[in-house]
């Protein structure tokens, strides 16, 4: 497939590198957007890289490269500073690229990204705990994970998204004890999740007064593990009612899963892991007969694989999960989207999995910071969780009021639909526009502003651009040519060319904020152009068609980028 955008420049530079006799790889040739148009459209530091390897002067290397470069796509090529090579692209290059984007963005991206059609990723996202309402903190794994899934599908991976529910473990023994001791089944059946949460909180309150209750909870879970029929029936009821509530939230967020295998799914898959680890001498005796894996660093804590009473732990089920994923899908990449507090745990898990040789896949912990709120820490145990449903309700209500007060020509039904799209989009964008490794604070005013790096600003830009296309007399723009362009148009064209690179970096770093930042810059560039130039009333038909082609590319890329973030674009604003 013919290369596109930065890949074309990269290959042309690589051709002259080989001719000049330098030993390097295509991947070493990095092409980047310049910070200002006066320094060109794109630049590369390859001459300095080659100079470091060969002992030659960077400017001499740069001169030897550009003296032999094929100028078919370049307006000019110059050396800058200590040895940067700056490229100015000609209008024919941008015309060809824009026509390709307008004609078929899928093919355009495929020609720009590595061929990974035979690669598979399995990703675990969301994983709420059964019997508890989804709190706002569940947004991070759910939203970040869904976007990473979209991005990896976009670059060509086969992706399986597994919602690894917390539906097993000692906490269910505690809950079952609480139900049997204090619960009223008629009240639970009428309002299951709040009642179950209240019982869970009551257990912990009572256990603080009487620590022996923890032993009763552990005993109840052991009965559940051993297959006690009444315990199993109660547990199945809890899981069913929990999934009903979870699915309401997932529907609102427009998120689905390929597989939902909770911890309980791996109950019958753990004995083989335990037996193998024991046989190989990897699981050794620890305190009071627990089975452990000794750490490589003696200063670290050992990984406990089985408790002294024979009960399994989260890590036991996680090891079975890794083995199952490997057998079921033979993935190249296994990803867990879990907060940074679990970093040590995942280091332990991946180390034990490697010792057991459970998979040849790359295991990745995509960690993220915490949700920050000014007045409370979120803890299900203490019952002061900030409910996700309440946050989504408030987002939609605020966005609805914003839509009404903005003066858009919308009916009330249209304003409510815009409020839904904009409110949910604002929540997602607030998370995805920031680096996942930072803590995230909700700021309603910033999230729902038509200025700055926000979803309303980007949505409005995309919708306004779509409106221009709809008002034109054309339905297909890929056959149009670009006329000589102004600097504001050239900024848009340059930004369009680096979209595949933004997608690639988002995948490599597992960071959707690369795409969010890209879209914000594209929106700024387009608004600068739009506010200073006419499109449908341009000075000539040639200029109108040129600007329609460019606008069509902006719409295609903005809609695609927002889709990777899981954000809809409204038809009307």
Image: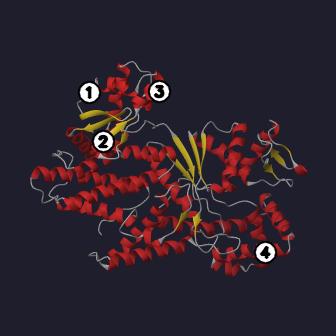
Side of 241 relative to 537 (left or right)? right
Residue 290 vertical placement versus 531 (above, below): above
Q: Quadrant of residue 110?
A: top left
Residue at which label 4 appears: 180
Q: Secondary structure at mark 4?
A: helix
Q: CA distance from mark 3 to mark 4?
A: 72 Å
In what quadrant of the picture does the N terminus appear? Answer: top left
Whichever of callouts 3 and 2 sits on the residue coming sooner in the sequence is: 2
Give the percent coordinates (x, y) of residue 221.
Answer: 79, 62
Side of 483 relative to 26 (left or right)? left
Residue at image point 15% right, 46% down: 483
Of circles 1 and 3, the one toward us is: 3
Whichever of callouts 3 and 4 sits on the residue coming sooner in the sequence is: 3
Q: CA distance from mark 4 to mark 2?
A: 73 Å
Q: Secondary structure at mark 2?
A: helix
Q: Residues within 10 Å of mark 3 (few under 14, many from 20)?
A: few
Q: In this view, which residue lies farthest toward the right?
A: 288
Residue 39's tag is 2
Q: Residues within 10 Å of mark 4 (few under 14, many from 20)?
A: few
Q: Does any portion of residue 569 appear in the rendered image? A: no
Residue 236 vertical placement versus 346 (above, below): below
Residue 52's tag is 3
Residue at which label 1 appears: 70
């Amino acid at each position: 497939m013919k290369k596109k955008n930065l890949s074309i420049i990269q290959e042309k530079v690589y051709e002259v590198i080989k001719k000049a006799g330098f030993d390097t790889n295509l991947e070493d040739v990095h092409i980047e957007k310049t910070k200002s148009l006066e320094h060109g459209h794109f630049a590369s530091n390859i001459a300095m890289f080659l100079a470091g390897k060969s002992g030659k002067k960077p400017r001499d290397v740069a001169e030897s490269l550009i003296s032999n470069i094929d100028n078919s796509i370049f307006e000019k090529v110059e050396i800058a500073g200590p040895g940067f090579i700056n490229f100015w692209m000609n209008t024919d290059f941008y015309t060809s690229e824009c026509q390709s984007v307008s004609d078929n963005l899928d093919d355009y991206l495929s020609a720009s990204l590595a061929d990974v059609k035979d690669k598979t990723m399995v990703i675990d996202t969301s994983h709420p705990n059964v019997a508890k309402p989804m709190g706002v903190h569940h947004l991070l794994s759910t939203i970040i994970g869904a976007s990473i899934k979209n991005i990896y599908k976009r670059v060509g991976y086969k992706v399986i998204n597994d919602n690894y529910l917390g539906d097993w473990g000692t906490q269910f023994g505690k809950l079952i004890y609480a139900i049997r001791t204090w619960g009223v089944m008629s009240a639970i059946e009428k309002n299951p999740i709040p009642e179950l949460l209240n019982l869970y909180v009551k257990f912990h309150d009572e256990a603080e007064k009487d620590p022996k209750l923890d032993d009763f909870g552990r005993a109840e879970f052991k009965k559940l593990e051993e297959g006690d029929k009444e315990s199993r029936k109660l547990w199945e009821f809890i899981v069913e009612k929990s999934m009903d509530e979870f699915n309401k939230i997932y529907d609102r967020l427009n998120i689905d899963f390929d597989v939902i295998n909770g911890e309980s799914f791996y109950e019958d898959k753990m004995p083989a892991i335990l037996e193998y680890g024991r046989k190989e001498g990897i699981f050794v005796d620890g305190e009071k007969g627990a089975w452990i894996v000794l750490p490589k660093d003696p200063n670290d804590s050992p990984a406990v694989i089985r408790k002294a009473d024979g009960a399994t732990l989260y890590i036991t089920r996680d090891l079975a999960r890794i083995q199952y994923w490997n057998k079921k899908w033979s993935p190249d990449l296994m990803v867990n989207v879990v907060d940074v507090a679990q970093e040590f745990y995942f280091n332990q898990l991946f180390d034990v999995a490697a010792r057991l040789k459970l998979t040849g896949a790359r295991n990745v912990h995509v960690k993220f910071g915490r949700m920050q709120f000014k007045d409370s820490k979120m803890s299900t145990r203490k019952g002061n969780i900030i409910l996700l449903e309440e946050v989504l309700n408030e987002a939609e209500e605020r966005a609805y009021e914003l839509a009404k007060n903005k003066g858009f020509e919308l009916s009330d039904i249209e304003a409510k639909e815009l409020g839904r799209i904009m409110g949910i989009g604002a929540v997602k964008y607030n998370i995805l526009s920031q680096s996942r490794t930072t803590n995230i604070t909700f700021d309603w005013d910033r999230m729902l502003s038509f200025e700055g790096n926000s979803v309303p600003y980007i949505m409005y830009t995309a919708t306004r651009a779509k409106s221009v296309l709809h008002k034109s007399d054309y339905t297909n723009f890929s056959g149009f040519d670009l006329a000589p362009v102004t600097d504001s148009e050239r900024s848009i064209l340059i930004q369009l060319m680096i979209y595949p690179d933004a997608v690639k970096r988002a995948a490599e770093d597992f960071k959707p904020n690369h795409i969010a930042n890209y879209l914000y810059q594209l929106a700024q560039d387009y608004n600068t152009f739009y506010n200073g130039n006419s499109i449908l009333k341009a000075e000539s038909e040639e200029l109108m068609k040129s600007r329609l082609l460019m606008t069509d590319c902006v719409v295609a890329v903005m809609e695609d980028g927002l889709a990777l973030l899981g954000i809809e674009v409204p038809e009307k604003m």
